[in-house]
Image: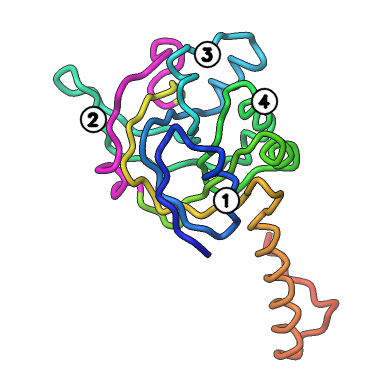
């Protein structure tokens, strides 16, 4: 496994050399996105603000931000589960020109295919560090605040060595969580045999 420190705009060559399991830190420009933005754009025809189209890093997060003395102050920042946005994953890569999507867990088959075809990766946090990351992020601005509110609005960010993230979906079709699931199954089978647990054992349900 390798470690990379990437700066946006992300180069195609940098994205294509990433493999599942690699560690990545990100710097440069990025923007936040949750379901209301994607639903408004892809399902309801809202035009994405032009300045956001200049970013190729999307972070699935609803940051906690307060406005103090006319300035926005970031309080806490932790990506949410990307699989919730699978409906719009492939579209966001294609229409928004994304090279990296950041979020917890992973995404589905359609997004995986778009990542192979268009050159994009999914990155998942290696640790739970919502407050440690605050010092790596500067709020540059916000769009559609009145329409969507602070959690759902797309925030424009300047990030510096944000991470660590693990590559869980790469441009070759690799999917880290599928590999881990198979490993867990193998270990589970071995544990059952070592402990003398029958194969047809069923867990007790509590009601």
Of 18 and 20, the residue lying toward us: 18
Q: CA distance from mark 3 to mark 2?
A: 24 Å
Asked whether disc 1 touches disc 2, contact meaning CB atoms under 8 Å apart, the reply is no
Residue at mark 4:
91
Query: Could you tell me which secondary element the residue under label 2 belongs to?
Result: strand
**Image point (23%, 30%), residue name:** 73
Q: Secondary structure at mark 1?
A: helix
159 sits to left or right of 3: left
Rendering coords of residue 88 (x, y %): 66, 28
User: Viewed as shown, does residue 194 lie left or right of 164?
Assistant: right
Of labels 4 and 3, earlier in sequence is 3
Residue that protrudes farthest toward the left in the picture: 69
Look at mark 1 in the image and give the residue it sits on: 17
- The number of callouts visible is 4
Real-space Cα separation, disc 4 to disc 1, in angstroms: 23 Å
Q: Is residue 29 magenta?
A: no
Residue 186's x, y, as percent? 73, 75
How far apart, in angstroms, are the residues tagged by discs 1 and 2? 36 Å
Foreground label between 1 and 3: 1
Q: Which mark is residue 48?
A: 3
Secondary structure at badge 3 equals: loop
Start and end of the magenta stretch?
Answer: 130-151
Question: Going from the N terminus, do you reach mark 1 or mark 3 first?
Answer: 1
Q: Name which quarter of the figure residue 62 lies in.
A: top left
Label 4 packing within 10 angstroms: few (<14), some (14-19), many (20+): some
Q: Earlier in the sequence, mark 3 or mark 2?
A: 3
- Identify the residue shown where x is 65% and y is 43%: 107
Q: Quick one: 144 or 191, which is closer to the camera?
A: 144
């Amino acid at each position: 496994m390798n470690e990379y420190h990437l700066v946006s705009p992300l180069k195609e060559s940098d994205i294509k050399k990433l493999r599942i399991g690699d560690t990545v830190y990100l710097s440069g420009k990025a923007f936040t996105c949750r379901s209301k933005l994607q639903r408004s754009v892809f399902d309801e025809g809202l035009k994405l603000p032009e300045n956001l189209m200049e970013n190729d890093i999307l972070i699935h997060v609803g940051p906690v931000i307060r406005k103090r003395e006319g300035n926005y102050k970031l309080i806490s920042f932790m990506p949410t589960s990307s699989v919730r946005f699978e409906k719009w994953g492939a579209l966001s890569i294609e229409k928004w020109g994304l090279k990296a999507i950041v979020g917890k867990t992973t995404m589905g088959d359609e997004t995986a295919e778009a990542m192979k075809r268009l050159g994009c990766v999914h990155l998942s946090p290696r640790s739970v560090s919502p407050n440690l990351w605050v010092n790596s992020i500067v709020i540059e601005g916000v769009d559609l605040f009145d329409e969507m509110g602070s959690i759902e609005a797309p925030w424009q960010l300047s990030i510096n060595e944000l991470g660590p993230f693990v590559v869980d979906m790469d441009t070759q079709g690799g999917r880290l969580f599928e590999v881990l699931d198979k490993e867990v199954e193998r270990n589970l089978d071995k544990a059952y045999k070592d402990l003398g647990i029958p194969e047809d054992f069923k867990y007790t349900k509590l009601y």
